[in-house]
Amino acid sequence: MGSPTSLGRGTSGHSPHLKFGRIEKGYAASLTIIDMQKPITIISKDLKTKCAWSPFENITFPGSVKYTVSLGQFSLS
């Protein structure tokens, strides 16, 4: 049995040839860009979960997600 990282790679549907763990040419770009000038409070009506709750409800974080990058593709929040 492999490490949790190798198990995740084997079950994630990604090619086993993708390299992870660095932000540089040749690696799969998967990261989150945070806007530290825009605090966010987690509230239940904004949640997009099957269980409809979060342990972070009513907690204010100092920044919010501006973009996500998954396998090199940008996504706006």
Image (cartoon, rainbow, N blue to C red):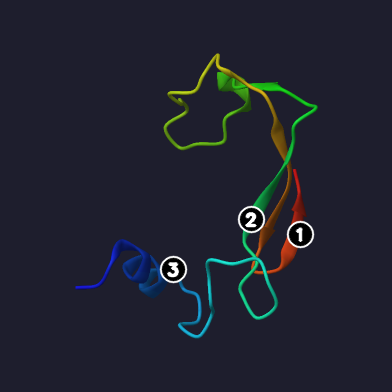
Relative depth, front residue between 49 and 21: 21
Q: Amino acid at mark 2?
A: Leu
x and y percent of residue 24 in the render? 68, 72
N-terminal label among 2 and 1: 2
Relative depth, front residue between 25 and 54: 25
Name the residue at 69% across, 58% down: 69
Crowd rating for badge 1 (residues with CA inside 10 Å; few <14, some 14–19, many 20+): some
- Residue lying furthest top: 58
N-terminal label among 3 and 1: 3
- Residue lying furthest left: 1
Residue indicated by mark 3 = 12
Question: In the image, which disc is placed on residue 31?
Answer: 2
Quadrant where the C terminus sits is top right
- Residue lying furthest bottom: 17
Q: Where is residue 65, by image quadrant?
A: top right
Question: In the image, which disc is placed on residue 74?
Answer: 1
Please say if the residues under marks 3 and 1 sit with CB atoms less than 8 Å apart. Answer: no
N-terminal label among 3 and 2: 3
